[in-house]
Amino acid sequence: MIITCVVCRISTGDILNRNYQIDDSNLPPVGVDPDLVLLVPYIPYPVPDYDDRYWLLVINEPSREAIQANNFPVHPSYPMMGQFLITYTTKRRPNDDIFLSIDNAMKNSNLSVMPVDQQLECISLSQAALIKKVNGMAITEEEQASIDSLINKCVKIRQNYDLAKAYKDMVTQGSTPDIDAGWQEE
């Protein structure tokens, strides 16, 4: 069976090839440069479940110093080979990245309140009706309904802006609010 190995240079700690293919019947390899070590990747734990809007996935693997020390634990499936241990952790994204995710969630919600293709018509009809009303002219029930609809949409959009501000304040304080919750939508 073909396995994938990581080839490292011991003297420098450099990783030369992360995808070296070798038949497992040829293990351990013979005649390899003594300054090289072939290691079989070992991933004992699954990738953690995380929200990539808040967190970055960090892949941890042997350091340059660890490679130079050339003291690798035995691989559990290939006892004649050392293991190239790979683990995962998460690191919190910078606040500005998280703010961008909050802004995107707010924009998506606002678009559900008032889709782009309806904005011009809704605003224009409501504005015309408001001008008539301000000038003392009678407006129809349909015109009043368009004014009321626009006001309701604007209230929801304002609430979304307020929620985004609250979420950003929470992020600044180190919290992780549920970016998918609480938005006003149509």
Image: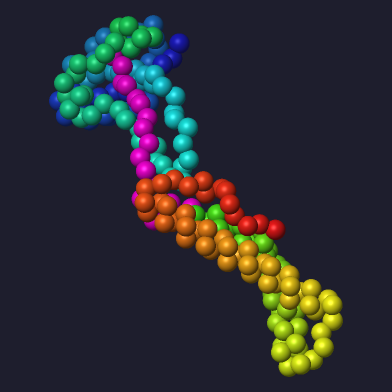
Specify the color scheme. rainbow
Q: Quadrant of residue 154?
A: bottom right
**Image location of residue 4, percent across then percent down:** 39, 20
- Identify the residue shown where x is 22% and y is 20%: 36
Q: Position of residue 108 (x, y in %)?
A: 60, 57
Q: In the figure, is residue 82 to the left or right of 173?
A: left
Q: Is residue 95 a member of the stretch shown in magenta?
A: yes
Q: Position of residue 182 (x, y in %)?
A: 58, 52
- Identify the residue at horizontal 76%, vertical 74% (top origin): 146
Question: Quick check: is 87 in the magenta stretch?
Answer: yes
- Say if residue 91 shows up in the picture: yes
Q: Is residue 172 left or right of residue 119?
A: left
Q: Start and end of the magenta stretch? A: 82-101
Quadrant in the picture for residue 144: bottom right
- Residue 43: where, in percent of width, then height? 39, 21
- 59 above or below 23? below
Residue occupying the point 41% across, 56% down: 169
For the residue pair 55 and 64, the one nearer the viewer reads as: 55
Report which quarter residue 116 is drawn in. bottom right
